[in-house]
Image: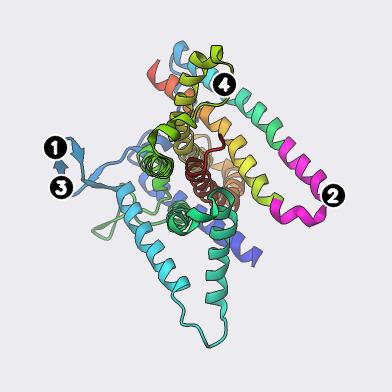
Amino acid sequence: MHASFFFLAAAEDGADAGKAIALALGIGLGALGAGVGIGNIFGSMIQAVARQPELRGELTGIQWLGFALTEAVVFYGLIGGLLAYVLV
Amino acid sequence: MKRALAVVALLALTLPSLAFAQSGEDETKFDPSEEWNLKTWGPDLKIGPIDMSINKAVAYLMLATIVSIVIGIAFMRIRPGRGPNRRQALGEAIYEIAQVQVAEQGLPTKAIGRWFPYVATLMIFIWVVNILGFIPLPLSDERWHVAGISIPTLAIFAATSTLSVTLALALMTFVFTHVEGIRENGSWAYFKSWIPDVPKAMLPMIIPLEILGQFMRLISLSVRLYANMLAGHMLILTFIGLIFLVTPWVFPFSVLLATVFYLFEVLIVVSIQAYIFAALSAIYIGSAIEPEH
């Protein structure tokens, strides 16, 4: 049984533990913003379709485009965090 | 149908975990990021500074190329006349997504003839690479010794979860965008179209930002696909890895969570990312051909 069950959080000394916390906190905060954004997109989509159901086909493409663009923000944070973790 | 899919997904998840269990004895530490440590297969083929040797990601790319060619031939080359069958219906559905949802979304009408093949190929190829990444295939670096012969263990790995692959794809779109923009508009008019109508005093601040923005497209296009696939695989591998790291009793919990993420990735993320990459390529090329200003 290992204490470090996440591959990055090999928390053998204090500095590594601090970096792991910073990485997790950064990704978590990034996910917070993206969560709000994705909720907004789908909420607006529901409202739009409720008002004008005949537009659903046209709106679906835009909805997924917006979803992927918003979702990607978390991953920029993830990649940035990983880079900072590995390089610093 | 849905029940069959769940069973297949569960099987697909337990097979790699069995593979991990096999190889886990001689290793003291489980580390999912080892999966991205690409080892060279066979001889080192180096042409100057360019490394042409074959590794896991290259093998996956070659396989994906063959599969996408087969998809293209099987679904698009259909002899008409004997009434539509299922193969033809599926082929037409793929074509319609590529035409209506991707090409017409971004490309102006006069450019669809020239750039539809490119964006449709991007969509199908990226989808195939992504979906191959979630099918356990014996293309792993790890070996499983059974009855004297060593065979590669089953593992999941997507070539698009390496930055080099996605960056190469994004570079193609980047080059095509600017080549097409210059060819259609002339270089002066094209580069001038980057700069929006703002007061003259703002120009020193706007021009570097707009030039930077063109390069940010390259980064965002490649990192979006790369990080999505990387994070998806990392999540699944980490949840399966909990069994070997914490205690075997987390087995139901971790397999359940891994299955949920697996289904999310296979049903949503794989297709969305292929669609988004192709659609954004179409939008970028389209906006270079017909600038707004």
Which numbered circle lies on residue B48?
1
One can see residue B31 in this view = no
Contact? badges 4 and 3 (CB < 8 Å): no
- Whether labels 4 and 3 belong to a single chain: the reply is no
* Callout 3: SS: loop
Q: Secondary structure at mark 4?
A: helix
**Measured along the vertical axis of the image, is residue B47 above or below residue A14?**
below
Task: Using the rendered view, name the quadrant where residue B32 is placed.
Answer: top left
Sequence order check: which comes first, mark 2 or mark 4?
4
Type of the residue with mark 1: Gly
Q: Which residues are magenta?
A: A40-58
Give the Cα separation between the discs numbered 1 and 3: 15 Å
Whichever of callouts 1 and 3 sits on the residue coming sooner in the sequence is 3
Residue B144, horizontal then vertical, whole percent = 31, 53
Q: Position of residue A86 (x, y in %)?
A: 40, 22
Give the alpha-carbon distance from disc 2 to disc 4, as whole Å: 36 Å
Q: Pointer 3 indicates a residue of which chain?
A: B
Q: Quadrant of residue A65?
A: top right
- Mark 3, residue position: B43
Q: Is residue B34 visible?
A: yes
Q: Is residue B200 above or below residue A55?
A: above
Mark 1–mark 3 CB contact (< 8 Å): no
Q: Residues within 10 Å of mark 1 (few under 14, many from 20)?
A: few
Amino acid type, residue under disc 3 in the picture = Pro
Assess whether residue A50 is covered by the magenta stretch. yes
Q: Which mark is residue B241?
A: none
In the image, B49 versus B137, the foreground residue is B49
